Image: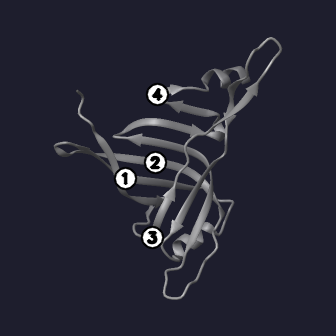
Amino acid sequence: MAEIAVNRINNCNIYVDGIGLIGRAEEIEVPQVKTVMQEHKGLGMWGKAEFPAGADKLEAKIKWASIYAEAEQLKANPFIAHQFQVRGDLMVWTSQGLSQELPLVYLMTGVFRDGGKLAFKHMESVDATSELSVYHAELYIEGEQIFLYDVMSNTYVANGVDLLAQFRANLGG
């Protein structure tokens, strides 16, 4: 019987354009590639099928812990793309306790599309969430690339396989 291993990530740090924002964000939601499926039905087919037709847009959200001048300056200009890096400690637990700690790195490039409303409340921290449009995303676990997606270059690599190589060749680029 194989031993069960449980992966846990309890914390991370966010970097924007190389600047560490430790303690300045409460939460970040990063995108994964979501395939857009197109339904196909035809005469002579008893059923319907769905086939991949592309990828949906990538979106991310950052919930800020308060108002920070550095963050407000980044959010102010929607024409400048920023480099984001999320670094986490992937802890692997087994019946023997903590067996491994692996680096998890998520990279993305995008623009702030919504700086977020600022909610001021009596005796509470200011609440602000920013939304981002993401053009490029990569995920690495223990230095191994899990996926890379770049909408502007028609690149989608999953588990080391360039899934759009033939597509780009067929389009002439």
Q: Residues within 10 Å of mark 4 (few under 14, many from 20)?
A: few
Q: How far separated are the C-alphas under marks 4 and 2?
A: 16 Å
Residue 93's spot in the image, x, y percent? 25, 45
At 65% across and 69% down in the image, what residue appears? Answer: 76
Compare marks 1 and 2 and give the one earlier in the sequence.
Answer: 1
Q: Secondary structure at mark 1?
A: strand
Vertical position of residue 22 compared to residue 33: above or below: below
Quadrant into which the N terminus falls: top left
Is disc 1 in contact with disc 2, using a CB cutoff of under 8 Å? yes
Per the image, the residue denoted by label 4 is 160
Which of the two residues, 90 or 150, is positioned nearer the viewer here? 90
**From what the image shows, is residue 2 above or below residue 139?**
above
- SS class of the residue under badge 3? loop
Q: Which residue is mark 2?
A: 106
- Quarter of the C terminus within the rendering: top right
Of pointers 2 and 3, the one earlier in the residue sequence: 3
Q: Classify 168 as above or below 106.
A: above
In this view, the residue farthest toward the top is 44
Q: Position of residue 158 (x, y in %)?
A: 50, 31
Q: Which residue is mark 3?
A: 24
Q: Is residue 107 left or right of residue 45?
A: left
The CA span between labels 1 and 2 is: 9 Å
Mark pair 4, 3: CA separation: 34 Å
Real-space CA distance between mark 1 and mark 3, rounded to the nearest whole angstrom: 15 Å
Identify residue for label 1: 88
Residue 70 visible, this angle: yes
Within 10 angstroms of label 3, few (less than 14), some, or many (20 or more) residues? Answer: some
Identify the amino acid type marked 4. Gly
Q: Position of residue 64 (x, y in %)?
A: 51, 69
**In this orientation, does residue 173 appear?**
no
Residue under the point 68% across and 62% down: 78
The colour scheme of the drawn protein is: one colour
